[in-house]
Amino acid sequence: MDVLALQERILAEVSAAGDAGALEAVRVAALGKKGSVTEALKRLGGMTPEERRERGPALNALKAAVAGAIESRRGALEAAALDARLATEAVDVTLPIRPERRGHIHPLTRTMENIAAIFGGMGFSRAEGPDVEDDWHNFTALNFPPDHPAREMQDTFFLDKAAGRLLRTHTSPVQIRHMQERQPPFRVISLGRTYRCDSDATHSPMFHQVEALYVDKGVHMGHLKGCLARFLAAYFGVEEVPMRLRPSFFPFVEPGAEVDIRVPGADRWLEVLGCGMVHPNVLKNCGIDPDQWQGFALGAGLERLTMLKLGISDLRPMFASDPRWLAHYGEVA
Ligand code: DAH
């Protein structure tokens, strides 16, 4: 048998094997139990010692050459398969990323955060009260006379008129709850939802207010005016907001005033909030001695403040959950 010819044939088959399966078939045909190389080696057993010494090394070299060729072919095939996989599974890191939808903070929420931060800077902490109030906190303790029109059905959402359960019509009852539970001095603001039977382009049955209350010794209108000036300038982001206090009536303050401002770019006075010195009756209703303590209070609608700042004329989209509106005003608020 021509060992060299056999070796040449097998090595040619090895390099022709195109994949792992074909290569395995070549291996079995050469080195398997009945493979050509195995058979040739078996035949050594029937030879004389001289023949064995002569042919043995060549046959062993054949086996080693075939096994080595198969191993290196296997390595080459595996590397090629890996290269092919890497080529098809490649990630192009230079592709632009897919745009992501980003959420926005609602402009009203942002207004609340801004106002809390501004008053926080003036030493006011936050107080809270329930949306479902009773007649005493919402009206009586705030010095509303029994026949005040705000107590009527057309303004107030009563949940149970006989029991005096209602949705708070303003944030002022939070003043009462805060004062009843502690003794002055204190500075608090309250931000939250309020409710009135009213609905048009500038009124919503559910809206938001901020209430501020400052009670201490020797508090006077000058403190109120200074606080207002600082708040409005900080909120609108200007040096100074032209402002005027117009005498007005609210049962829970005396004297009471409405505040008009000229927002940047506006050509007329716009009413933005109510304020005044806390009425002695209100302090008394909460167990605070009005001869010792004085205070000021103010209340403003947050929708109106937000609309003035952003130049929005219609209130209704604020509660319509239109993502286009939210994205627009969420960006700029
Ligand atoms: N609670 C009033 C309202 O809803 C607003 C208000 C006016 C609040 C005067 C005050 C104030 O604290 O002093 O119309």
Image: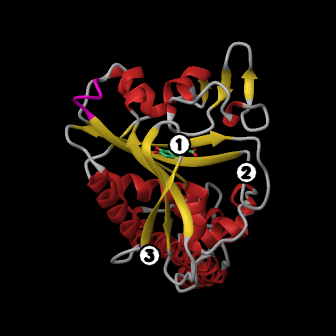
Element assignment for label 3: helix
Give the image location of residue 273, x and y in percent: 51, 56
C-beta proximity under 8 Å, tags 2 and 3:
no
Give the image location of residue 147, x and y in percent: 68, 28
Ligand 1 lies under 8 Å from the Cβ of mark 1: yes
Q: Which amino acid does label 3 sit on?
A: Ala
Q: From this viewpoint, is residue 104 visible?
A: no
Give the image location of residue 250, x and y in percent: 53, 42
The stretch in magenta equals 289-293
Find the distance from the CA under tag 1 to the CA under tag 3: 117 Å
Number of numbered callouts drawn: 3
Q: In this figure, which residue is indicated by the disc labeled 2?
A: 204
Element assignment for label 2: loop
Query: For this rendering, which residue is in front, 108 or 184?
Result: 184
* N-terminal-most mark, 1 or 2: 2
The answer to whether residue 83 is above or below residue 157 is below
Q: In this figure, which residue is indicated by the disc labeled 3?
A: 58
Residue at (64%, 69%) from the top-left corner? 327
The answer to whether residue 47 is above or below residue 238 is above
Query: For this rendering, which residue is in front, 201 or 293?
Result: 293
Find the distance from the CA under tag 1 to the CA under tag 2: 21 Å
Q: In this figure, which residue is indicated by the disc labeled 1?
A: 250
Element assignment for label 1: loop
Crowding around mark 1 (Cα neighbors within 10 Å: few <14, some 14 to 19, many 20+) is some
Label 1 or label 3, whichever lies nearer to me, is: 1
Q: Is the magenta stretch mostly helix, strand or loop?
A: loop
Residue at (71%, 61%) from the top-left corner? 315
Query: For this rendering, which residue is in front, 198 or 268?
Result: 268
